[in-house]
Amino acid sequence: MKSSRPYLIRALYEWILDNDCTPHLLVSVDYPEVRVPEGFASDGQIVLNVSPSAVRNMHMDNDSVDFEGRFGGVAHSLHVPCQAVMAIYARENGQGMVFEIELPEGDPDGTPAPEPSGEGSDAPKPSGRPSLKVVK
């Protein structure tokens, strides 16, 4: 299954805005492909105000959050892979969600994981209908 993180980020972003609060993202700047302004991170993390009044051209999809923002009066184009988002929360009350950082798929050295093949795969194939049990 696809990661639920991008869906949760988008839903919580809307929820925070609907409650007249300011959405903030906590991002791991050490995650691959993160593009944020240098010098504004602390301890490998950066907090980004992503309210509509603070950013321009915001685009959230299942892969990343992209937008333009100003830092120290200078415009920057930011790119944050969804997997690099450590938390999304409302500045006013801290309500939101914290996520665990997931390493990119593949080996620790950054090489991509091999695609599973349809033939000869060792993965067990589901059989029968799925079922749920009520546990009391």
Image (tube, grey):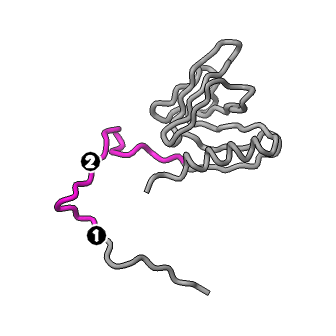
Q: Which residues are magenta?
A: 101-123
Q: Is residue 118 magenta?
A: yes
| 109 vs 4: above or below | above
How far apart marks 1 and 2 lie (CA) works out to: 18 Å
| 42 vs 102: above or below | above
Q: Quadrant of residue 128?
A: bottom left
Q: Which mark is residue 114?
A: 2
Q: Could you tell me which secondary element the residue under label 1 belongs to?
A: loop
Tell me how many marks there are: 2
> Residue 7, percent across and down?
57, 49
Residue situated furthest left in the rendering = 120
Tell me if 103 is positioned left or right of 92 in this view: left
Q: Residue at x 67, y 43 (%)?
A: 88
> Residue 85, percent across and down?
58, 41
> Residue 81, percent across and down?
51, 36
Q: Residue at x 62, y 20 (%)?
A: 39
Q: Is residue 23 magenta?
A: no
Camera-side residue of 7 and 27: 7
- Residue on which disc 1 sits: 124
Residue situated furthest top in the rendering = 74
At label 1, the amino acid type is Pro
Tell me if 101 is positioned left or right of 92 in this view: left
Provide the major secondary structure of the magenta segment: loop
